[in-house]
Image (spheres, rainbow, N blue to C red):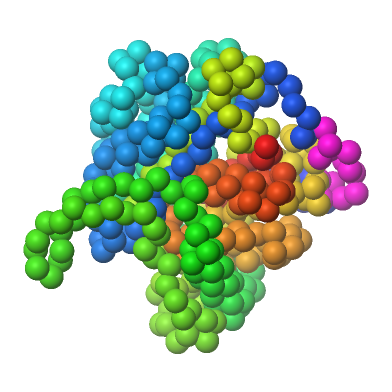
Amino acid sequence: MSSAQQRLSQVSSHFGLTGQKGAAALTQKHPDDIVVTCALRTALTKGGKGGFKDTAAADLLAGVFKAVIQKSGIDPKAVEDVAVGSVLPPGGGATEFRAAALVAGFPETTAVKSLNRQCSSGLQAVVDVANAIKSGMIEVGIGAGVESMSSQYGPGAVTEFSELLENHPESANCKVPMGVLSEDMAKDRGISRASQDAFAADSYQKALKAQKAGLFNEEIAPLEVKWTDPKSGEEKTITVKADDGIREGITAESLGKIRPAFAKDGSIHAGNASQISDGAAAVLLMKRSTAERLGQKVIGKYVAASVVGVKPLLMGIGPWAAIPIALEKAGITKDDVDIFEINEAFASQCVWCVNELGLPAEKVNPKGGAIAFGHPLGCTGSRQVSTLLTELHRTNKKIGVTSMCVGTGMGMAAVWVAE
């Protein structure tokens, strides 16, 4: 059986009528559960224009670390390791992220690492810490993500390939720009512009409604930063406490007037793709027994994760490949899941994944997604955890999934339970 056939078999079996008792088992509590006791993010702001345009990534990280310490009440000395996902910084950000942890109040005994799995870097960081706790390597850790696309996004972020890599067809596909390959995928898979614009408009409208109702407030840690007014050149101190990419008045009709970005007859444009943004997020994890010993309030539980590879030119199908495997590992089906947070890298790929998996629209990104408020690359995977757990609590629901497609052709997903 080919790998493609195996995946199709997995999709059909995982989304069948089996495992109906899985949800009940998943919500049981055990001393060795890997739990979340705090999950916070900064606001997400527009790259080059928004509230964090003049703030370094490490400063955003230090700010969210301080907020986690304050809100959770954790003794910084108890945190043994911190993993930070980030895509764009030179050297992976390892040096400044260690410095940010020290600034935030963690002692020199707290270790720090950076990692890069492209758009899933923030989720990979959280999963790495969860696995380290599960294995007994550490007792308490933080998985985080950060990106300043204002300062580090652009041509300099593109890797030059050697002749060896350029001469291998599949290898060379790894550096095809995501907008171009997403445009090709939309044409190949028959994803209409109308469906993309409708999905994008819905994302904006849901995010606007949620923001006006204050539904993001609990997950956002306000940060005070320096900001230079582009018109006057005056430097000001501002407090950033709300996503500034969310816009009013966005409809499928208004999006339909925007010119395609990657092909004259294309369907992808700035209004139905994720925004370039700045932001940071952090998730505090430990075993349930440790949380009880330290007096930490449990807000959720990490259950399982998956990571898969797909063809580089089909990068966008990553969630379709990853979600069924994560559900299988958790022993549940799609029907057991209350909320799916699937990153909106492009409306085209998100629409295709949702349709192919047969997910109810009302369960997908109920407060909007990256099209409406941004996708700071390394931050998103950890940001989704705070968004998901907060919304599960608010709606008195239990089980959620976070997922995203990943540059160069991968997908990642994780299953969570709110408490």
Residue positioned 43% across, 67% down in the render: 246
Residues drawn in magenta: 13-25
* Number of numbered tags placed on the structure image: 0
Q: Position of residue 64 (x, y in %)?
A: 37, 39
Q: Residue furthest left?
A: 233
Residue positioned 58% across, 72% down in the render: 202
Pick whichever, 187 or 54, lies toward us.
54
Q: Position of residue 334 (x, y in %)?
A: 77, 50
Q: Horizontal placement of 45 versus 272: left or right?
A: left
379 in magenta: no
Q: Position of residue 47 (x, y in %)?
A: 30, 59
Residue positioned 62% across, 73% down in the render: 191
Pick whichever, 410 or 36, lies toward us.
36
As drawn, 412 above or below 265 = above
Residue 403 visible? The answer is no
20 in magenta: yes
Pick whichever, 135 or 389, lies toward us.
389
Q: Horizontal placement of 393 versus 312: left or right?
A: right
Residue positioned 51% across, 15% down in the render: 138
As drawn, 343 above or below 38 = below
Quadrant of the drawing holding the C terminus: top right
Quadrant of the drawing holding the N terminus: top right
Residue 382 visible? The answer is yes
As drawn, 35 above or below 306 = above
Which quadrant of the structure image shows residue 235? bottom left
Q: Position of residue 335 (x, y in %)?
A: 81, 52
Which quadrant of the structure image shows residue 76? top left
